[in-house]
Amino acid sequence: MENTYQLQPNSRHCFGCGIANPFGLHLRFFEVEPGHVTAEITVPDNYQGYPGVVHGGIVATMLDEAAGRAHMGGDPPRYLFTARLDVRYRQNVPVGKLLRLVGKVGKSRSRTASSKAEICDESGKVLAEADALLVDVPDGIVSSDDLEALGWKVYPL
């Protein structure tokens, strides 16, 4: 990742980005520009479905995380639930190979938002993509005053 990109916060226990989750993917997202995030991952063998291929549910998880992260670059960040995730599996996503996740914002309304996400191989070929419809987390569930207490902060690389 380029040093000019802004590292986004992580949680401690999220399956996608939780740095302390022993079973999680430990995704680290960088904001390329407002509304555009990226992460790199080499998925280990324990997340495969068929030999050599990332399980489809893990592919959907990575796309879901990238789609939601695209909206989290503001101050305070916008927290959203996924209401719908339309995944298109273009080709097998390999384990053990460097992958790039990309998330980009779409339309934003008062309580909903949309975004797009992709998983690409090292050459930039799109292996899987998704369109997401997201809904704001209701007031009172996540308070910006409690974020660090919840483990939500930028952790050193």
Image (tube, rainbow, N blue to C red):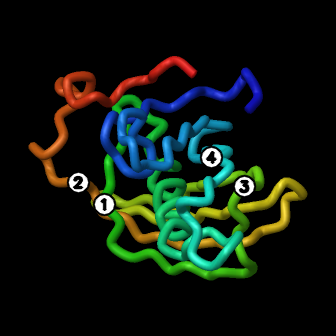
* Gap between marks 2 and 3 measured at Cα: 34 Å
Q: Residue at x 62, y 68 (%)?
A: 54
Q: Identify the residue at the far left of this view.
A: 140
Q: Which quadrant of the view contains residue 130?
A: bottom right
Tell me which label, 4 or 1, sits earlier in the chain: 4
| Residue 122 falls left or right of residue 95 | right
Residue type, mark 4 in image: His
Viewer-nearest of discs 3 and 1:
3
| Residue 150 falls left or right of residue 10 | left
Secondary-structure class at tag 2: loop
Secondary-structure class at tag 4: strand
Tell me which label, 3 or 4, sits earlier in the chain: 4
Q: Identify the residue at the far top of this view.
A: 156
Residue type, mark 3 in image: Gly
Mark 1 crowd level (few <14, some 14–19, many ≥20, 10 Å Cα): some
Q: Which residue is mark 4?
A: 36
* Gap between marks 3 and 1 measured at Cα: 30 Å
Tell me which label, 3 or 1, sits earlier in the chain: 1
Q: Which residue is mark 2?
A: 137
Question: Disc 4 vs disc 1: Cβ atoms closer than 8 Å?
Answer: no
* Gap between marks 3 and 4 measured at Cα: 25 Å
User: Which mark is on residue 81?
Assistant: 1
Secondary-structure class at tag 1: strand
Q: Residue at x 76, y 50 (%)?
A: 98
Residue type, mark 1 in image: Phe
User: Which mark is on residue 96?
Assistant: 3
* Gap between marks 2 and 4 measured at Cα: 20 Å
Question: Disc 1 vs disc 2: Cβ atoms closer than 8 Å?
Answer: yes
Tell me which label, 1 or 2, sits earlier in the chain: 1
User: Which mark is on residue 149?
Assistant: none
Question: Disc 2 vs disc 4: Cβ atoms closer than 8 Å?
Answer: no
